[in-house]
Each structure stands twice: as C-alpha cells, then as structure tokens.
Amino acid sequence: MTSILPVSKRILKGLTVFAFWIGVWYLLALAVNQELLIPTPHKTLLVLLEFAKTAKFWLSVLFSTLRIVSGFLIGVCIGALGGILSVKIKLFDTVLSPILHLARAVPVASFILLAYVWIKTNFIPVFITALMVAPIVWATTVTAIRGIDKSLVEMGQVFRLSKREILLKIKFPQIAPAFISSVVTALGLAWKSGVAAEVICYPEQSIGRLLYNAKTYLETPETFAVTIVIVIISIALEWLMKHFARRWAQND
C-alpha cells in the first residue's frame, strides 16, 4: 500500500500540471479567437484523431522513428568509441577536437543544407541525428573516463583483480551515470534535429513532411497535432530509456 501511494501522488501531480497547461492553451485560443494563430485543444485533438485513421500517418511516424533512432544509435556508438580513443590516444584527441567544436558551433540548418547536396534525401535525417548526438556523448565519455577515481583502481590492483574485473566493477560504475545522462539528453536533441532535417529535405513518409505540408497550407491545427505527436514519441522513448537504465542499475 505504501508503495502505491507515492506513484498515485506522482500521477495526480502530473495530471494536474497537464490540465493546467491545457487550460492555459484553451484560454489563449479563446482570447486570440483565430484558429490560424492558435487552435483550441479540442480542434487539435479532432485533427489528431483524423490523422490516426490514415495509414499514411502511421507509416510516416514509423519511418521517422526508424530514421531518427538509427541516427541516434549510430551517434551514441561513434561518441562512445571516439571518447574512449580520445583518452587513450592523445594524437587522436588533438586532431579531432576541432571537429567536435565545429559540430557543436555550426547551426543544424547549415549541416542539413550541406547534407542535402552530399547525401540521398532519406538518409539525411539519419546523418544529421548522428552528427548532433555524437559530440554530446563523446565529450561526456571523455570527461567521465578522466574523472575515474584512480585510488579505487589502484586498490583493485592491490587486491589482484583482473583488468576485466577492474573495468566492470570499478571503472564502468563510475562512468555509467554520466554516460546514461548524456544519452538521455542527446535523445531529445536527436528528435529536434531529425525532424528539422525532415522538414527541410522533405523525404517521403515522414513526420517532417507532414509538418511542412501543414505549414505550407497554413493548417495550424495540423501543425499543432503533428507537433504533439513528436513530443509524445520523444517523451515515450526518453521514459523507456530511463526505465531500462534504472532496471540496469538495480540489477547491477
């Protein structure tokens, strides 16, 4: 019973906050009284339900998710591997450090437009997502590895632990929290950059294409509805990642 109460309170708190902002949205829509500027929540929900009845909508959601998640995973792998190599090989870090700073400094739109010339349209969101995710994971991996408590490593060596045991029982637990946090942060950026790439490069069967069409024809309720879908998917994936991270920490 005691374990159920905190969960119930969190759910109630979440629903209260959600209802508050829906109310603010509704009052703003009434005050403006222009659907072209701000549609009501009711109108947006109706549009969303109409979208949900079509196969095209679900295919767009599926293919966008596959593209962005693929780019995200590629970016995480590149970032983790690059971070490890940067710590192990000083020349590698020296040569590639400017590239990381460039990737963080240059606007996403610039990369998208350049990629539009280099890469096939359907692969641009994958490339852009990986490009935005990799520097975040890379930098965090470097910082986390360099922050390992050397005294704990030396203690493990005194107790004659193998290199594998030192890695799994001493180094990895110190690196994991920061790494997981950076991955969760990168996931949100992955969706923003991935959808932005789709809006600009306009691939077939994509959320970005739906968003672009809604904007082109000044269909504001459709724009709101598609944006809500993007937010829901992003939150759901972030929740899943945090859930698996907690489960992993409990089982470790």
Image (cartoon, rainbow, N blue to C red):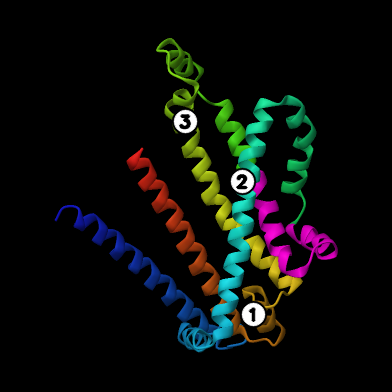
Name the one closer to the observer, 221 or 233. Answer: 233
User: In the image, is 115 to the left or to the right of 187?
Assistant: right
The tag earlier along the polypeptide, 2 or 3, is 2
- The chief SS type of the magenta part is helix
First in sequence: mark 1 or mark 2? 2
Q: Is residue 124 magenta?
A: yes
Cα separation between marks 1 and 2: 30 Å
Q: Which residues are magenta?
A: 108-136
Does 193 sit above or below residue 22?
above
- Helix, strand or loop at label 3? It is helix
Callout 3 amino acid: Gln
**Where residue 14 appears, x then y in whole percent?**
35, 64
Which disc number belongs to residue 174?
3
**In the image, what residue type sits under mark 2?**
Cys
Give the CA distance from mark 2 to mark 3. 19 Å
Query: Mark 2 highlights which residue?
Result: 77
